[in-house]
């Protein structure tokens, strides 16, 4: 395990130590938890992004098949409308 040196003002340090004591941990433990949660959050975000792209691809394929049954050409695919893209997928 690596050590890190933190440089924060006295008031922030006091608050961090108080919070850590209330949680039954140390400031280092809280920092470790925070960094692990960032990694987990990033992994979850990537998983959701991939799922959204797969869903958009599925919708585009479905729309292309509906638009021209039996003819599969890249030119025949029309973009999805804003209404067809779930609101939580639009950034």
Image (spheres, rainbow, N blue to C red):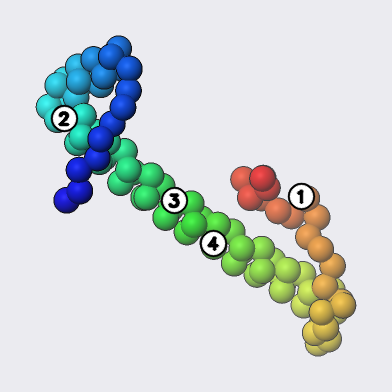
| Marks 3 and 2, the one that precedes in the sequence | 2
Tag 4 or tag 1, which sits nearer the N-term? 4
Q: Distance between the residues labelled 4 and 2?
A: 37 Å
Confirm or deny contact between disc 3 and disc 4 (CB under 8 A).
no
* Residue 5 visible (yes or no): yes
> In this figure, which residue is indicated by the disc labeled 3?
42
Position of 17 compared to 69: left or right? Answer: left
Q: Which residue is drawn at 78% across and 50% down?
A: 82
Horizontal and vertical percent for residue 31?
Answer: 27, 36
Kindly report which numbered mark, 1 or 4, lies closer to the viewer in this rendering.
4
Q: How far apart are marks 3 and 1 (CA)?
A: 28 Å
Name above or below for residue 46 compared with residue 18: below
Q: Looking at this view, is 12 or 78 the one in front?
A: 12
Rate crowding at label 1 as few (under 14), some (14 to 19) or many (20 or more) other CA atoms within 10 Å.
Answer: few
Position of residue 63 measured from the top left corner of the image (x, y, whole percent): 77, 69
Which one is in front in this view, the residue at disc 3 or the one at disc 4?
Answer: 3
Cα distance between the residues tagged 3 and 2: 24 Å
Q: Is the Cβ of the residue at disc 3 closer than 8 Å to that at disc 2? A: no
**Secondary element at tag 3:** helix
Q: Do the residues labelled 3 and 1 touch (CB within 8 Å)?
A: no
Q: Which residue carries the number 4 mark?
A: 51
Question: Quick one: label 3 or label 1, which is nearer the N terminus?
Answer: 3
Residue found at the very far top of the displayed protein:
11
Q: Is residue 81 left or right of residue 38?
A: right
Q: Where is residue 86 in the image (x, y as percent from the top left)?
A: 66, 50
Tag 1–tag 2 contact (CB < 8 Å): no
Mark 4 residue element: helix
Q: In which quarter of the image is residue 91?
A: top right
**Would residue 15 be seen by someone viewing this image from the given angle?**
no
- Local crowd at mark 2 within 10 Å, few (<14), some, or many (≥20)? some
What is the quadrant of residue 35 in the picture? top left
Q: Find disc 1 in the rendering and name its residue.
A: 83
């Amino acid at each position: 395990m690596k050590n890190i040196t933190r440089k924060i003002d006295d008031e922030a340090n006091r608050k961090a130590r108080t919070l850590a004591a209330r949680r039954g941990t140390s400031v280092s433990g809280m920092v470790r938890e925070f960094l692990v949660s960032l990694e987990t959050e990033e992994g979850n975000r990537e998983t959701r992004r991939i799922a959204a792209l797969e869903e958009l691809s599925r919708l585009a394929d479905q729309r292309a098949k509906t638009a021209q049954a039996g003819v599969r050409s890249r030119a025949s695919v029309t973009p999805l409308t804003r209404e067809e893209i779930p609101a939580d997928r639009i950034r």
